[in-house]
Image (cartoon, rainbow, N blue to C red):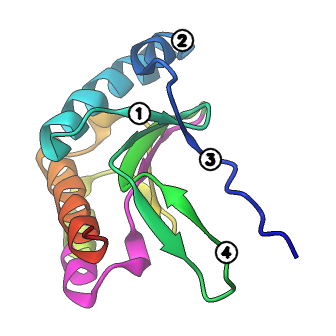
């Protein structure tokens, strides 16, 4: 059986043009701030993943099912309803997960799913805590997927 290809692929899309195209002004401004934050934390250039994810770095994953592919190590997307910030949530080691949970308690208004942190507006969160969450995730991904 042919393996399904990951729909979200790294591409040469223009990150600045994508952010400029975000319809909601507040979300567009927050995306520009997140871009600066992620660039500072990761020290790698942003790349578009699919049509709406701004990603940093990459890693190769392989599930027990045999499905495998590549994805950004971290990133974000300025979605219509909120900012989606990709952090590895429950997949990280116990120490990182415990630290993440303590930071989330200090973050401010947010929702957390498996690997997505949802924030409506950056003004509703503590930016230093958000930066630490992104840094911890980046450090974990670099340990877990060193190449």
Q: Position of residue 72 (x, y in %)?
A: 42, 51
Q: Is residue 66 left or right of residue 39?
A: right
Kindly state the secondary structure of the residue where label 4 is placed: loop
Q: In this view, does 40 lie to the left or right of 51?
A: left
Q: Which of marks 3 and 4 is in front?
A: 4
Identify the mark nearer the N-term, 2 or 1: 2
Q: For the magenta stretch, what is the residue range?
A: 81-99
Q: Name the residue under label 1.
A: 47
At label 1, counting other C-alpha atoms closer than 10 Å, the crowd grade (few under 14, some 14-19, many 20 or more) is many
Kindly state the secondary structure of the residue where label 2 is placed: loop
Question: What residue is shown at x 27% (from left), y 32% (from top)?
Answer: 45
The answer to whether residue 101 is magenta is: no
Q: Name the residue under label 3.
A: 8
Q: Nearer the viewer, mark 2 or mark 4?
A: 4
Kindly state the secondary structure of the residue where label 1 is placed: strand
Question: What residue is shown at x 46% (from left), y 65% (from top)?
Answer: 60
Q: Which of marks 2 and 3 is in front?
A: 3
Identify the mark nearer the N-term, 3 or 1: 3
On screen, residue 28 above or below 40: above
The N terminus lies in which quarter of the figure?
Answer: bottom right
Q: Which of marks 2 and 1 is in front?
A: 1
């Amino acid at each position: 059986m042919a393996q399904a290809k990951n729909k979200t692929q790294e591409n040469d899309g223009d990150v600045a043009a994508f952010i400029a195209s975000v319809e909601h002004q507040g979300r567009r401004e927050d995306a520009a701030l997140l871009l600066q934050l992620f660039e500072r934390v990761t020290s790698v250039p942003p790349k578009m993943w699919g049509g709406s994810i701004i990603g940093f770095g990459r890693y190769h994953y392989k599930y027990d099912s045999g499905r495998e592919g590549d994805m950004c190590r971290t990133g974000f997307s300025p979605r219509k309803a909120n900012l989606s910030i990709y952090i590895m949530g429950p997949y990280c080691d116990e120490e990182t997960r415990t630290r993440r949970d303590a930071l989330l308690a200090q973050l401010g208004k947010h929702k957390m799913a498996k690997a997505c942190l949802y924030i409506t507006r950056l003004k509703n969160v503590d930016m230093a805590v958000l930066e630490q969450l992104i840094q911890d995730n980046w450090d974990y991904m670099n340990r877990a997927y060193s190449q």
